């Protein structure tokens, strides 16, 4: 049984290796007509499971049952941008979490409070 489980795990790992390589995380550079270079960056997470068991039989023949599976999650997170001799990271926010939403609201909130204070002083 030990070798059969190892074989199942090996197949799962090999399939993951086929799906994910370094170009999945750091993509191929894209050159725009103005000379700007964009390099896509993604977050990759994956998992796999394999298992098996010898099955009881009445005869001398060994039976084995097993299975394996894998999952992969690829999320684009931004671009490395090279333009005019400068390099910067341009993040993508596909679904901002609550903290990001609050941080993004702060400038608007400060402006609104400032406007309210100014109106109150003018009265």
Image: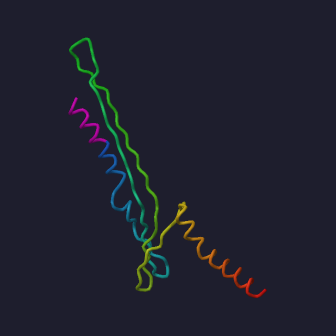
**Magenta stretch encompasses residue 82:** no
Q: How many marks?
A: 0
Locate residue 8, reporting x and y percent: 29, 37
Locate residue 116, reporting x and y percent: 71, 79
Residue drawn where x is 34% and y is 40% of the image: 49
Residue drawn where x is 39% and y is 53% of the image: 45
Q: Quadrant of the C terminus?
A: bottom right
Pick the front one: 81 or 47: 47
Q: In which quarter of the image is residue 104?
A: bottom right
69 sits to left or right of 100 = left
Locate residue 89, reporting x and y percent: 44, 74
Q: Quadrant of the N terminus?
A: top left
Pick the front one: 106 or 19: 106
**Majority secondary structure in the magenta region:** helix
**Magenta stretch encompasses residue 2:** yes
Farthest residue toward the bottom? 122
Farthest residue toward the right? 123
Q: In which quarter of the image is residue 107?
A: bottom right
Q: Quadrant of residue 9?
A: top left
Locate residue 60, reporting x and y percent: 20, 14
75 w.r.t. 60: above or below: below
82 w.r.t. 54: above or below: below
Residue drawn where x is 39% and y is 67% of the image: 28
104 sits to left or right of 84 = right
Residue drawn where x is 41% and y is 71% of the image: 29
The colouring scheme, among rainbow, by chain, secondary structure or one colour, is rainbow
116 sits to left or right of 90 = right
72 w.r.t. 104: above or below: above
102 sits to left or right of 11 = right
What range is drawn magenta here?
Answer: 1-11
Farthest residue toward the top? 58
């Amino acid at each position: 049984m030990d070798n059969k489980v190892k074989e199942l795990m090996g197949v799962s790992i090999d399939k993951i290796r086929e799906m994910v390589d370094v170009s999945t995380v750091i993509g191929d550079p894209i050159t725009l007509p103005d000379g700007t270079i964009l390099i896509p960056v993604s977050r990759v997470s994956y998992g796999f499971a394999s298992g098996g068991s010898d099955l009881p039989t009445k005869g001398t023949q060994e039976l084995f049952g097993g299975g394996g599976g894998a999952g992969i999650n690829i999320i684009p997170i931004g671009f490395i941008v090279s333009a005019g001799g400068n390099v910067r990271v341009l993040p993508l926010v596909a679904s901002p979490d609550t903290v990001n939403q609050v941080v993004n609201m702060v400038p608007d909130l400060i402006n609104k409070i400032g406007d309210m204070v100014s109106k109150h002083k003018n009265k």
